[in-house]
Amino acid sequence: MVTPDSARRYFAAHREAILADWFALLRIPSIGANPQHLRDCSACAAWLKKFLRPLGFTATVRLPVGGGQPVLLAERLGRADAPVVLLYGHYDVQPADPLDAWQSPPFEPVLRNERVYARGAADDKGQFFAFLQGVAALIDAGANLPTIRLVLEGEEESGSRGLLASLTSWRQELQADVMMVADTGVHPSGRPAIIAGLRGILHLTVTLRGPRTDLHSGTHGGLAPNPAMGMARLLASLHDDRGAIAVAGFLDRVAPPSAQESDLANAEPFDEAAYLHATGVAPVGGETGIPPYERLGFRPTIEVNGIHAGYGGPGSKTVLPALATAKLSARLCAGQSPRDCCDKLMAHLRAHCPPGLTIDFPEVNTGTPALRLPLLSPVVRLAEDVLRQLDPRGPVFLWEGASIPVVGALRDVSGASPLLVGFGREEDAIHAPNESFGLDQFQLGMAYTMLMLEALC
Amino acid sequence: MVTPDSARRYFAAHREAILADWFALLRIPSIGANPQHLRDCSACAAWLKKFLRPLGFTATVRLPVGGGQPVLLAERLGRADAPVVLLYGHYDVQPADPLDAWQSPPFEPVLRNERVYARGAADDKGQFFAFLQGVAALIDAGANLPTIRLVLEGEEESGSRGLLASLTSWRQELQADVMMVADTGVHPSGRPAIIAGLRGILHLTVTLRGPRTDLHSGTHGGLAPNPAMGMARLLASLHDDRGAIAVAGFLDRVAPPSAQESDLANAEPFDEAAYLHATGVAPVGGETGIPPYERLGFRPTIEVNGIHAGYGGPGSKTVLPALATAKLSARLCAGQSPRDCCDKLMAHLRAHCPPGLTIDFPEVNTGTPALRLPLLSPVVRLAEDVLRQLDPRGPVFLWEGASIPVVGALRDVSGASPLLVGFGREEDAIHAPNESFGLDQFQLGMAYTMLMLEALC
């Protein structure tokens, strides 16, 4: 029988081999959103296929319908009387810049103070690899496992376009009863968390063009419109002075949380001091007058992920830049249509384009809608019991601010009940320099996998 | 006797040698504002010293009081009964990025269609080199020249700090009656121009810091304040919806042009179609309801020269950036104190810093005030006559939008009457990629120098 300690013992006995494999996976710079890394993504999928064979998986690398990064599909047949489990994860990682902010190179994993540092150490290679090592530990213990199916994609960080386009073609291989998603975190208090909601997402790149070339700010200042200044004004128009989104119609379908949702979301109070300590910043973003849990889980955002225009080097260069570029993303809430929100956002930006400048949208991704999951299903009850074995306080329900674009569509195609439990923590610094994942977190992921797969049988 | 044709004949006879020297000067990447180019600036000053010796100049390379790029001071003694002429120019050039927008490398000068392409081809190496070649042509013609003094500095593009700090120490070497400044342009109509005013300048770098590292825009969007968004809002606060500067007190001392100034400034109407053709943009910048010549010559600006924050590569990276940086410069008008304006600008930025973010000013240059020059002095009358020989339409008076920080201070120390006549044109693209200077412009500069030096005797 599996106990919460089984994972720890297995990890201790196989530590060198597990780290060697994990590091090999992290060394592959599988930045799915960057076309220059196409070959790395293929290499990553091939590596996973090879890794899975000794565990009894039949794995295939599939090219998505209409193009995109390869998807690894795998199956390990098991007990016919147990529910089929589908694991979803992603092997693609975020870009690694700014590179000079990394203490060690992002694709040369190192262990410091029992934490693995590398791009993808947590998000999501570390998380799904803990699941796979949990399966390995169960096999080693002679457990009679359920049938396990895997879908590991390479475009989660850029909208899962390839997998989304292929879901209906691969419907057969994806059928399952329970869908475990290994891509989320624990509560800031450290209590395990079951994700009850995910925000949707859309993103786009907007450019403002002015003069044909950079102009002298003396001989043209006051005459030529300035794209850098124009971009500042354009982006400032997206919110009102309270921090609320000012795009006409954008908030139309956003509903406040129900009383039950409010109660569950407030099971652990939001710790402002801990937030400041963890991030270096007070939680004063978003709309004033709305509590933090609601701003994160129940309200949409429009964020600027980057702005670039004109001179940025040492000293001064007194130009009016020819071009300004901004990268925007919006997080969406239940009820909001990504396409409708994207249309409204683009219409707003076009309508507020400063005079004399030309607006364009070289990249537009209408993204995926938000997801609300049932709070009281049998599989959620089972997960609550398992998580209480790992932490006597039991799990909390979280309405996540992040997005995992494919979860809703995968649920619809697979017929499986989604279960989003992961062991990420704030200190993992995902999407940021010096991303890391603790060996303790890794072993919790293994233990949860082992207990959950046993409980399902 | 010198005629308008003398310069053309001399240039034709010595074309290869003149271009070889000019190209050698342009090959030195003397970017004065960038500390990495200290050695190039020294090399440039040394090159000039060597070049001037055969022309009879006694030249010395002087290090400014308190540091800075070297300044070349030179003297060529001449007739005791003629006014002493001081030429001011600068050998430093603007940074050359974006490098990939150049058709040929910025520091490998080439001749295409009778134009020299290189960083500094016009601003200011080409312009002051035309003056020096004019002197060479007069010497070749056996002219009895006045005493000529030269001051060629290496920090004009970044505020002339070294020269400004050294002026009183070098007072003796700078005494003169007429000060010719070879760093301006003709009217857009092509008519020669006498500069009647220059705007002042100040510049600063502003940073907004938020979270300790870039944060995930899903798990933190709506909680953490976003420095990129904050910078957009901060910069947007600098102007009102009419495009007028909204910094409290900034416009207090700005006066409209007098009736005489208005008349002279409107001698040639502003050609909006030509502006659009030349720059690719309609002249709709600055404050609405104020005519273009007034917005350029008689109103201050605050411009964004650059903004950089977060991700700017291909695809998306959904972060809240840790840092946003903007480079600002302001052009100032007669009556405005640069220090006072800088204080007001910084106070405004501090007061409008969005909550949760930290504002800093890593680079501040309070710059120099604007300059108004007398319209009816004897030396201006002389220049009008000379310029009418080069163009029968005669010169127009221009209130320039640009700044030449040191002109006012140099006038005060030297006791000389400034005369700002140059032969730059819009198509020169100074401060921008593919800067160039036409051989016709170069020969006009030579001819003006020759006629003016003769007329002064």
Image: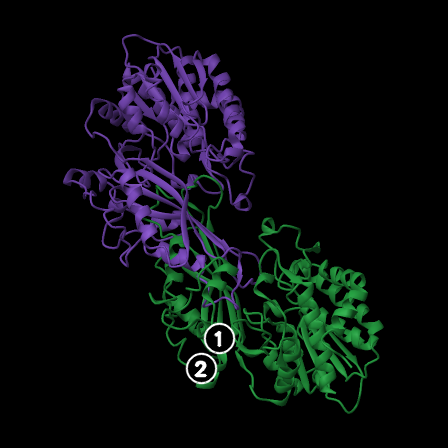
Chain colours: A purple, B green
Residue A405 numbered tag? none
User: Can residue B210 be seen here?
Assistant: no
Are the residues flagged by discs 2 and 1 from a single subunit?
yes
Which residue is outermost to the front? Answer: B392
The residue carrying mark 2 is: B257
Q: Gap in Å between the C-alphas at discs 2 and 1?
A: 9 Å
**For the residue labelled by badge 1, is the local secondary structure a helix, a strand or a loop?**
helix
Query: In the rendered view, does A255 fall on the left or right side of A164?
Result: left
Query: In the rendered view, does B15 fall on the left or right side of A417?
Result: right
Give the residue type at disc 1: Gly
Residue B297 numbered tag? 1
- Image spot of residue B388 (x, y percent): 63, 79
Q: Is residue B154 above or below residue A336?
A: below
**Residue B392 in which image quadrant:** bottom right
* Residue at (69, 74) in percent of width and height: B64
Give the residue type at disc 2: Pro
User: The C terminus of chain B lies in which quarter of the figure?
Assistant: bottom right
In front of the other: B28 or A449? B28
